[in-house]
Amino acid sequence: ANPVAGHSPSADEPQQPVRHSPGQANTLNFTQVVGGNNHTCGRTDTGSVRCWGSNFNGELGNGTTLHQSVPVEVLGLTSGVAAIDAGANSTCALLNTGAVRCWGTGVYGGLSDDGSTYQSSVPLEIVGLSAGVLAIGVGENHACAALAAGGVRCWGRNEAGQLGDGTTETHFAPVQVV
């Protein structure tokens, strides 16, 4: 089965790598690819993440806001990534440790518990999700994480109740789905 957005592939699902050879550089073997509005990210068979495309909001995770027409390395994610997912202008990575890191803009919080960090051009750990996450899903302006202990936590905009906490209030830190 091929990985899809919001789906973290399990170890027993076969994955066929997609080869990419940027110029004369070493071949990258992508095992998962996700797309946002105008950016794309891929997880390689070595557990690293590369992104390309629009970078107005830091959605490529390389510490800049320069657009890239070839895959560039996401800072701090050169190995150990289990799964990725992308929203409109953001991307999140689930690490092998069960931690979640996100970058770009549009997940309305999660990058800080008070909402003061709305945008980042480098991956930042999501508050309260440093371990114990099994799967992630990123929407246009929110994200969710399924926990190994059971339950789901979501954060971000919530005007339609997409966080599942019984309110329509934006939450900057992950809240429990009821």
Image (tube, grey):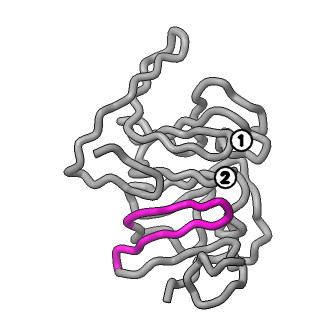
Which mark's residue is nearer the viewer, 2 or 1? 2
Estimate the x, y position of residue 174 in percent, counting from the top left. 59, 77
Residue at point 66% right, 24% down? 69
* Residue identifier under label 2: 88
Q: Nearer the viewer, residue 160 or 55?
A: 160
Residue at point 60% right, 42% down? 75
Q: Which mark is residue 63?
A: 1
| Drawn side of residue 134 relative to residue 33, left or right | left
Estimate the x, y position of residue 94 in percent, counting from the top left. 46, 57
Estimate the x, y position of residue 168 in percent, counting from the top left. 69, 84
| Drawn side of residue 37 relative to residue 26, left or right | right
At numbered mark 1, what does the secondary structure look like: helix, strand or loop? loop
Residue at point 28% right, 55% down? 10
**Residue range of the region highlighted in magenta in the rendering:** 134-149
Q: Quadrant of residue 105?
A: bottom right
Question: Can you say whether 71 is above or below 171 in the image?
Answer: above
